[in-house]
Image (cartoon, rainbow, N blue to C red):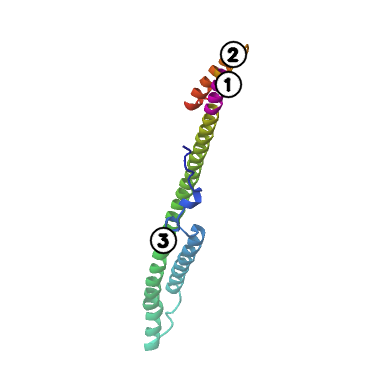
Amino acid sequence: MPKMMIPPFEAFEKPEFHIGGDPDLVWETSATWTSFNDTAEEIIAELHGLPIDEFRGTEGEYYSAQVKEIRPKLLSDISEVHGAVGALLDSYGQTLGEHLFEMWGTAKDGRIKHQAVVDAINAYNIAEQNAIKAKAYAASAVRTAIIGAGTPAGPLLAANAKSAVSAAELAEKGTF
């Protein structure tokens, strides 16, 4: 009996097993966050280097506190958050890239193995068809040999029938 064919490989690729995303775009986003972090650190250093000693009075003290303490602290906190987000995005991009690479390799391997199964099923079905044809030919050759047994061609017909039966047995075993 012929073996049932299996569906194409694409039938097994389900959307719920798909990982989407582009690691390069994730890394671009990471770079944006990290770049803000780096720029903020540079600005903090520049704020600390500003010459504000000549400002006097309460307004000078207020301005000095803003430039030397309050604004750098606020910018440092924001910078730290941006740096952390950038690092996490970078890590995510790396992990995403590794998993996509692994999935592409697994899918490629799956396609190759799937095709080997399809080829094996086709080969089995062809061998089975050949065995059926060989058995039918052997049965016909045996009938012809029986009918022609008393004729001068009888020995030749018997030899042909014997050969056909041997070929049918080999085909049945799959070695034809």
- Circle 2/circle 3 CB separation < 8 Å: no
The picture places residue 45, in percent across and down from the top left corner, at 44, 69
Q: Is residue 8 left or right of residue 95?
A: right
Q: Farthest bottom residue?
A: 58
Q: Residue at x 50, y 59 (%)?
A: 22
Q: Which region shows up in magenta?
A: 135-145
Check the image and report above or below for 137 versus 114: above
Tags 3 and 1 touching, CB below 8 Å: no
Q: Residues within 10 Å of mark 1 (few under 14, many from 20)?
A: some
Q: Residue 87 carries which label?
A: 3
Q: How crowded is mark 3: few (under 14 residues within 10 Å), some or many (20 or more)?
A: some
Magenta-span inclusion, residue 155: no
Observer-nearest residue: 152 or 21?
152
> Mark 1 is on which residue type?
Thr
Comparing 35 with 161, the one in front is 161
Local SS, label 2 = helix
Which amino acid does the dot numbered 2 rest on?
Gly
Task: Specify whether residue 137 is painted magenta.
Answer: yes
Give the answer, above or below, for where 127 lies relative to 55.
above
Q: Residue 154 carries which label?
A: 2
The residue that label 1 is drawn on is 144
Query: Looking at the image, is mark 1 or mark 2 earlier in the sequence?
Result: 1
Q: Where is residue 79 in the image (x, y as percent from the top left)?
A: 41, 69
Determine whether the residue tagged by mark 3 lies in a helix, strand or loop.
Answer: helix
User: Closer to the N terminus: mark 2 or mark 3?
Assistant: 3
In the image, residue 131 sits, relative to residue 147, either above or below, namely below
Q: Which dot, 2 or 3, sits closer to the camera?
A: 2
| Marking on residue 24 | none
Of badges 3 and 1, nearer the viewer stands 1
